Amino acid sequence: MWTLDLSTRERVAFVDITGEVERLVRGADDGVVVVFVPHTTAGVTINENADPSVRHDLTTALERLVPADLPFTHAEGNSDAHVKAGLMGSSVTVPVLHGSLQLGTWQGIYFAEFDGPRRRRVLVTFVATRS
Amino acid sequence: MWTLDLSTRERVAFVDITGEVERLVRGADDGVVVVFVPHTTAGVTINENADPSVRHDLTTALERLVPADLPFTHAEGNSDAHVKAGLMGSSVTVPVLHGSLQLGTWQGIYFAEFDGPRRRRVLVTFVATRS
Amino acid sequence: MWTLDLSTRERVAFVDITGEVERLVRGADDGVVVVFVPHTTAGVTINENADPSVRHDLTTALERLVPADLPFTHAEGNSDAHVKAGLMGSSVTVPVLHGSLQLGTWQGIYFAEFDGPRRRRVLVTFVATRS
């Protein structure tokens, strides 16, 4: 298991971590890599890597789905971030072949920050299909 | 693969199963654990374990996202439960190091009931990174 | 890793791929199977296999959650598809015992098309719990 450390700069941000994950599994054989976020107000998602407007639109849509001013009870005032993290999920699993991520042409792996700016961690585990 | 049996007491409930999963992987080595829910009106999610108001707020937000009175066609009248289960997902995958779940400080694993009360099952599979 | 090829016929469609995945893992031993979609306007989800109205209702609910006419900026005009794919997720992981998928009685695996009709691929990886 490897650990990635990162810092986010805004309250809501999608940080591309594809290159870091790619470097970690290089040298591995065949299997899957699990990218796990050990936080409750952030998640991880796979989405388009080419046009940054897609991440902008994802932010817009999530904001509309879970407005910060819903009648929430959690005293810290970041309930929307917990819900958004739940919708995105805490991990993604990607196939690996000969040490290479089998992402589609337009796919990137994004750390999904919903309550930044903060220092965050990502846990990356490679599991081989055979020993 | 292990099976957990549980009973939910309300229509919508988040049941903390972190301790049970933790006990199952104790004694395992390094790898990931997959917690899978074999139902279509329930799911599993990772969220805050400290303040119960976060689960309350998640319930509120999901209720607003998928109201039970949408123009649904499924005759059983629990379409909202199917959609909520789809949004939460049927499994979570968590890294394990020396038999210990690598959850963040504030993370717990929750069985997400959307059409209870019912008797439910959870399938837990540990996959080692190396043999 | 195996590859499934499929063609979708409508803009939004849930295509049952349970049988194909089942056939691929037959002959495998114990473990988990990861079903991964290498696209950014499609995803994969587990939901009810019996009554097709459940998929219809899931379509209705997602359409209401992410209407195509939100103020999106992505020029291709399919931002709603990217968001819906993000909500459903890019992979599902299912336990396998003696080469048999451990799905619940009512569960099926569905390729979730949100910007069809298109030719699509699904990557299927079996990971054994022990060698």
Image (cartoon, coloured by chain):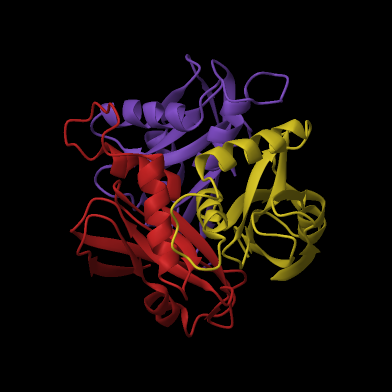
Chain colours: A purple, B yellow, C red
Classify residue C78 as left or right of residue A22. Answer: left
State the residue in front, A77 or B21: A77
Q: Quadrant of the C terminus of chain B?
A: bottom right
Q: Quadrant of the N terminus of chain B?
A: bottom right
**In the image, residue C120 lies at what x, y percent?**
24, 61
Where on the picture, by quarter, is residue A68? top right
State the residue in front, B86 or A70: A70
**In the image, residue C59 lies at what x, y percent?**
37, 55
Classify residue B83 as left or right of residue B29. Answer: left
Classify residue A14 as left or right of residue A83. Answer: left
State the residue in front, A126 or C8: C8
State the residue in front, B97 or B120: B120
**In the image, residue C13 lies at what x, y percent?**
30, 61
Residue located 51% across and 25% down the image: A67
Q: Is residue A56 above or below residue B92?
A: above
Can I make out residue C89 in this image?
Answer: no
Exactly how many numbered labels are in the figure? 0
Residue located 44% across and 68% down the image: C109
Residue located 48% across and 59% down the image: C92
**In the image, residue C49 lies at what x, y percent?**
46, 73
Can I make out residue C12 in this image?
Answer: yes
Classify residue C5 as left or right of residue B28. Answer: left
Where on the picture, by quarter, is residue A17? top left
